[in-house]
Image (cartoon, rainbow, N blue to C red):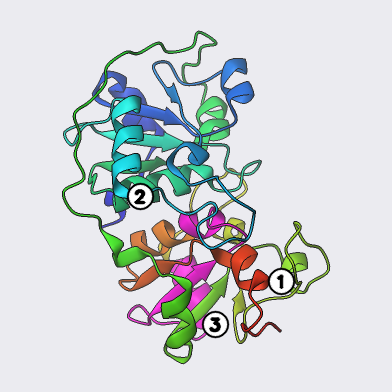
Amino acid sequence: MPEDYFISAETVASNLNNYLLIDAREHSEYLKGHIPGARSVQWQSLSDMNGEAGSETWATLLNNKELEHQIQKIGLGSTDNIVVYADAHQGWGEDGRIAWSLHVAGLKNVRILNGGYSHWKARGLKTTIIPTFFNTKSDYEITRRDSSSTIHTKALYRDYSQFRVIDSRSPEEFRGKIDLGEQRKGHLPGAVSLPFQRLLTESGTLKSFDDINKMLSDLDIKKASPIVVYCTAGIRSAHMVLVLKAAGYTNVRNYTPSFYHWAALSYTPIE
């Protein structure tokens, strides 16, 4: 259901105390202004940032024990109504990456604020510069990791021909005109280019599901197609995975190691 993944600014503003808000932007942006009560959390805190960029685990989700520890530190529990937001047009889909991470960790009530912080401000809704202090450590436990929306390099490489692969980076990255320090340029073989921001309107809210369905239909991707989305390090692709799930695509996975890792391997083909 769409409402399992996105929530409107009006719904949140009408009952702010009902939601536990996570601001996924850079902490420096949070300090300039945020939604009252929001906790500042960056996607890296839920990810393995050790080792070299492009190594197999770099920027992928933490193991269960460490992920559980981070979720407890942020004070998230299974009964919280969690809403994550970032800046829809300035960002890289960090809100989607955090929401996706928490879904994988088994938290069910996690939604992205449709339109993000800029849309919230444009609607004249309440903001503050006072940081939210919280010392509520939760006792959340990961009982079962939901890996249905993830895929690792080995499985993608082995079963490559079975998947419809979407590149959610910019057209320039897709064509190999620019890179972010990856070892090779280009894209995964046969991948279609669909930059993640093309799914958003000018105000940063989601386009209608009819529009999104048409975009995918034009790429010959169906609701039941097995889809793998990637970007550079699994941030923009995580956001797109949740948008597609909200739009009714039932078999969508985030290739978290993404192009950084794929391009660093000696045996993986690139176009």
Q: Mark 1 = which residue?
A: 174
Tag on residue 219? 3
Residue at position x 18%, y 54% from top?
A: 144
Decide which of tag 1 and tag 2 comes sooner along the chain.
Answer: 2
Query: Dot 3: what SS?
Result: loop
Task: Classify residue 254 as left or right of residue 190.
Answer: left
Closer mark to the observer between disc 3 and disc 2: 2
Whether tag 3 and tag 2 are in contact, CB under 8 A, the answer is no
Type of amino acid under label 3: Leu
**What's the CA distance linking mark 1 and mark 3?**
16 Å
Residue 152 lies, with reference to residue 10, above or below; the image says below
**What's the CA distance linking mark 3 and mark 2?**
35 Å
Query: Dot 2: what SS?
Result: loop
**What's the CA distance linking mark 1 and mark 2?**
30 Å
Q: Position of residue 2 (x, y in %)?
A: 31, 55
Q: Quadrant of residue 46?
A: top left
Task: Classify residue 201 as left or right of residue 186.
Answer: left
Residue at position x 41%, y 36% from top?
A: 84
Residue at position x 42%, y 16% from top?
A: 36
Decide which of tag 1 and tag 3 comes sooner along the chain.
Answer: 1
Task: Classify residue 101 as left or right of residue 121.
Answer: left
Query: Dot 1: what SS?
Result: helix
| Mark 3 neighbour class, 10 Å CA radius: few under 14, some 14 to 19, many 20 or more | some
Q: Quadrant of residue 20?
A: top left
Whether 218 is among the magenta residues is: yes
| Mark 1 neighbour class, 10 Å CA radius: few under 14, some 14 to 19, many 20 or more | many
Q: Mark 2 = which residue?
A: 63
Tag on residue 39? none
